[in-house]
Image (spheres, grey):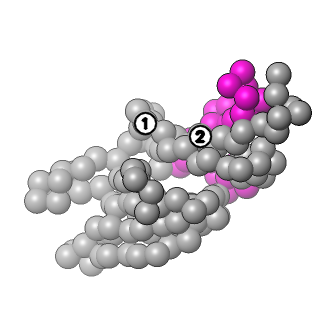
């Protein structure tokens, strides 16, 4: 596991896991059901070699942290970055994620910080950034 891992809260964790598999090629490593048998208390995914954890919203359960999911009208104030080795991976992931149902918020482009970069919003209110260094011969 990397030294820091995003932990997403969503409404519909099972659907989110399936979505992240389609959009980002996520691999599900672990799923723990909540005591109610309906919601997911914890899940562990691997995306591009990194770990993303998530759970369903437990707004009405202070014993589970009383956590709230973002909404489409007010997306999460933080974003999860997927770092790639090659710029083409940013473009391919961006296309796949949009086809899966992400909303494009910033098309892939070469940046002043010498990277290929794009931004997306998923159907669960989370923001994603895709980043890869530009090859030395492509740097401005």
Q: CA distance from mark 1 to mark 2?
A: 10 Å
Q: Are marks 1 and 2 in contact (CB under 8 Å)?
A: no
Q: Nearer the viewer, residue 28 or 68?
A: 28
> Can you say whether 86 is above or below 104 in the image?
below
Seen in the image, is 39 located left or right of residue 114? left
Query: Residue 100, labelled with which disc?
Result: none
**Which residue is identified by label 2?**
129
> Can you say whether 26 is above or below 68 in the image?
below
In percent of width and height, residue 103 lies at 63, 41
In percent of width and height, residue 89 lies at 76, 51
Q: Which secondary structure lies at badge 2?
A: strand
Magenta region: 95-123
In percent of width and height, residue 127 lies at 52, 40
Q: Is residue 105 magenta?
A: yes
Q: Is residue 29 magenta?
A: no
Seen in the image, is 106 located left or right of residue 1? right
Residue in the picture at 24% in, 50% down: 67
Q: Which tag, 1 or 2, sits closer to the chain's start?
A: 1
Q: Quadrant of the C terminus?
A: top right
Q: Quadrant of the N terminus?
A: bottom left
């Amino acid at each position: 596991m990397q030294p820091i891992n995003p932990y997403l809260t969503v409404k519909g964790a099972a659907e989110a896991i399936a979505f992240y598999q389609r959009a980002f090629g996520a691999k599900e490593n672990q799923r723990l059901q909540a005591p109610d048998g309906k919601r997911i208390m914890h899940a562990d995914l691997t995306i591009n070699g990194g770990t993303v954890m998530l759970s369903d919203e437990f707004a009405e359960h202070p014993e589970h942290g009383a956590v709230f999911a973002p909404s489409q009208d007010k997306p999460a104030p933080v974003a999860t970055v997927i770092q790639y080795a090659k710029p083409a991976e940013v473009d391919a992931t961006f296309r796949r994620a949009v086809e899966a149902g992400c909303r494009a918020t910033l098309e892939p482009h070469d940046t002043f910080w010498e990277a290929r970069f794009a931004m997306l919003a998923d159907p669960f209110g989370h923001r994603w950034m895709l980043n890869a260094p530009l090859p030395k011969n492509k740097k401005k």
